[in-house]
Amino acid sequence: REERKFFSTGSGSPIGLGVVEDGFKEGMGVRDGARLAARAVRAAVERDIGSGGRGMDVAVITDEGFRLLSEEEVERLLR
């Protein structure tokens, strides 16, 4: 089984995966990773009609657990 550092699925995944492949850096922090994920989803939503509306959920999963970011936190990541 192949281990991957990131993954993308869904109709907009080729677009999102391109953003992640371009921006991923080994050892990046949680905030930078969340920002990259949000940028990838935004790019997919803007360019793929099947990806849904403009809203998105971004969650951070670490050894400490799962945390869903607020809408305001996601907006700040995308600035």
Image (cartoon, rainbow, N blue to C red):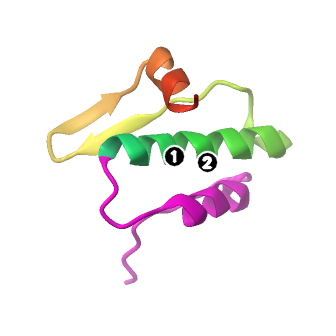
The residue positioned 61% from the left and 48% from the top of the image is 40
25 to 52, vertically: above or below = below
Q: In this view, does 62 lie to the left or right of 58?
A: left
Q: What residue type is labelled 1?
A: Ala
Please name the predominant secondary structure of the magenta segment in the image: loop
The magenta region covers 1-29
Q: Quadrant of the C terminus?
A: top right
Q: Does the magenta-highlighted stretch encompass residue 22?
A: yes
Classify 6 as above or below 33: below
Determine the secondary structure under disc 1.
helix
Q: Kindly identify the residue that appears in the image at 14 percent across and 40 percent down.
A: 64
Q: Name the residue under label 1.
A: 37
Q: Is residue 7 left or right of residue 5?
A: right
Query: Residue 25 location, x and y as percent?
Result: 42, 64
Report the side of 11 relative to 19 (left or right).
right
**Direction from residue 39 to residue 34 in the image, left or right:** left
Q: Which mark is residue 68?
A: none
Query: What amino acid type is highlighted by mark number 2?
Result: Ala
Location of mark 2 (residue): 40
Question: Residue 48 at x, y = what percent?
Answer: 81, 46
Q: Residue most toward the left?
A: 64
Q: How crowded is mark 1: few (under 14 residues within 10 Å), some or many (20 or more)?
A: many
Which residue is depicted at the point 51% across and 29% down? 57
Residue 43 in the image, given as x and y percentages of width and height? 71, 44
